[in-house]
Image (cartoon, helix red, strand yellow):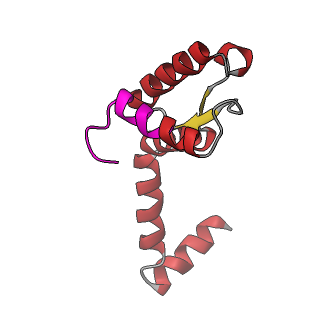
Amino acid sequence: METPHTGVAIFNAVLKCIQEWNLENKLFAITLDNVSNYGSMAKVLRENLLAKGVIVGQGKFLHQCCAAHILNLICQAGLKFIKGTVTKIRESAKYVRGSYGQKEEFNEIVT
């Protein structure tokens, strides 16, 4: 799809596909990332399908957020939170593995 990637432009592209594939009166839900353009596209699509009377349940469940995308965002935030700790652990492991003497001393401390 060419730019601009506005909600209306995305809506036009999606609606064209839905019509070509004969899905207009079969569509229940679509799963999208959490991008504002997709949200506005879903709103316009819902209004369009409601006006045509071809959407189930008044389009209440039309726009579903992608669970994998949400989990990715949660993991990225969590990794940022513990980044300092992870770096310290990595540096400690490098130090211990740096020589046989350091490894031996580490094993004694652990024991």
Q: Quadrant of residue 54?
A: top right
- The C terminus sits in image quarter: bottom right
Exactly how many numbered labels are in the figure? 0
Q: Residue at x 59, y 21 (%)?
A: 49
Left or right: residue 108 compared with residue 33: right
Q: Residue at x 52, y 43 (%)?
A: 17
Q: Is 12 part of what is drawn in magenta? A: yes
Q: Is residue 96 above or below residue 47?
A: below
Q: Is residue 47 above or below residue 109?
A: above
Q: Residue at x 42, y 48 (%)?
A: 83
Q: Is residue 88 above or below residue 16?
A: below
Q: Position of residue 25 (x, y in %)?
A: 69, 29
Q: Position of residue 95 (x, y in %)?
A: 42, 71
Q: Which residues are magenta?
A: 1-14
Q: Is 10 part of what is drawn in magenta? A: yes
- Res 35 seen here: no
Give the residue at the far left of this rendering: 4
- Res 23 seen here: yes
Q: Position of residue 101 (x, y in %)?
A: 48, 83
Q: Position of residue 64 (x, y in %)?
A: 62, 30
Q: Looking at the picture, tell me which residue is in the foreground, 36 or 94.
A: 36
Left or right: residue 104 compared with residue 88: right
Q: Is residue 104 above or below residue 106?
A: below
Q: Looking at the picture, tell me which residue is in the foreground, 38 or 95.
A: 38
Q: Residue at x 66, y 31 (%)?
A: 29
